[in-house]
Amino acid sequence: MKALIFCGSGDKNLIPITYTIPKELIPIGNKPLVVYTIELLLKSGINELAIVVNAFNRPLFERVLKYYLKKDFHYLIEKEPKGIVHTLLLAEEFIKGDKFIMLLGDNFFDFDLKSFIRNFEGEEMTCKILLKEVEEPEKFSVAYIGNGRIIDLEERPKMAFSNLAIAGLYAFNKNIFEACKAIKDFNMGQYQIANVVKWLMGNGYKVGYEKLKGRWRNIDSPSELIEQNIDILSSLERNIAGEVIDSKVSGKIILMEGSTIYNSIIRGPIVIGQNTTIKNSYIGPYTSIGNGVTIDKSNIENSIILDRCNIWGVEDPIDSSVIGEGSTIMGTRSMRKSHKIIVGRNSKVYLGV
């Protein structure tokens, strides 16, 4: 069994953050989103995987994933965004007739993938799709089921008659490439996976499903980044490797080596990276702070602070924020209100001026 992870397309919903970093590499709980997916695959016994990226982002993916996972991966280059079908055909040589898992790299999964794989390998079907019951199906692509199979798919319906969202994970056998080539010959432009699955169903191939028993989130907005950060930090184990001086630290905290907390109040769950300094500040629950960050005389909670940021003199709370790498946030006076800040890399924000 092999795996294919799609990380090739841009994302407008997370601008300005994604101007300088692919969505799949945004740290959540101080670890890039796609790393959680790769760890799930490795834990499930899949060691042969390919990552689809564009040529510009490939060096960044190689460097980041090598750092976090200490492994090299196979990369497929998406020259232009023509849809998943085109990219699947790029992967045919890598797959070499094997069964494989296909995942979207901007999704977070936490479930028994090993069981999903085992069930697919024991069944006679061309495709199996992971589904999740949701409260607002109109926000998702949905599946309609009957007699143990998927009988139809619908992209973001205005009025959904199914609450089963397609959760961004598929299993295929080699017949998927026959479907891709047939669809491509119709010259349909942007070829989406729904077109391929419908072709399979229309040509007598069995398309099954499994309802997800676990967690899944499609990270499609800053608020979903924050919500996923909360979920991940909720399961932290306390580990203080840095230095705490004249400070009150409570709750589940990860403080990495080389970091110092001085004269501050820290309430977990919080993760703080390496070589970070926090002075004269309050850091509240569900905050992820990266490496090489300096925070002084500031109030932060429920936020994601990327590497090398400087935050000084922000007495009013920075809340539900995502601060891009190398950014500077400065406050000059209290404005008696909280601040929600979403900025990309190397930004400068002055509050109360």
Image: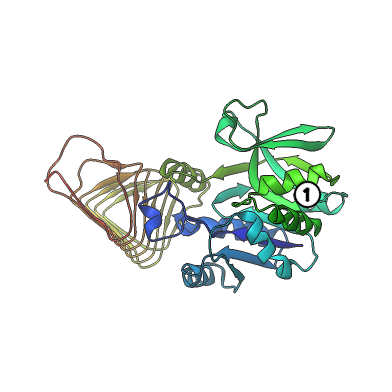
**Residue at point 37%, 46% (across, down):** 303
Q: Is residue 265 left or right of residue 95?
A: left
Q: Which residue is drawn at 60% across and 64% down?
A: 51
User: In the image, residue 181 lies at what x, y percent?
Assistant: 74, 58
Q: Is residue 161 left or right of residue 205?
A: left
- Reading the image, the residue beneath label 1 is 127
Q: Is mark 1 on a helix, strand or loop?
A: strand
**Residue 222, image x, y percentages:** 41, 44
* Residue 203 vertical placement versus 24 (above, below): above
- Crowd rating for badge 1 (residues with CA inside 10 Å; few <14, some 14–19, many 20+): many
Residue type at the position of mark 1: Cys
In the depicted structure, whether residue 148 falls above or below residue 49: above
Q: On the picture, is 186 further left or further right than 353?
A: right
Residue 223, image x and y in percent?
A: 42, 41
Confirm whether residue 295 shows in the render: no
- Viewer-proximal residue, 1 or 241? 1
- Residue 224 lies, in percent from the top left, at 47, 42
- Looking at the picture, tell me which residue is in the foreground, 235 or 345: 345
Q: As displayed, is residue 86 above or below residue 142?
A: below
Task: Name which quarter of the figure residue 261 lies in.
Answer: bottom left
* Residue plotted at (22% across, 40% down): 316
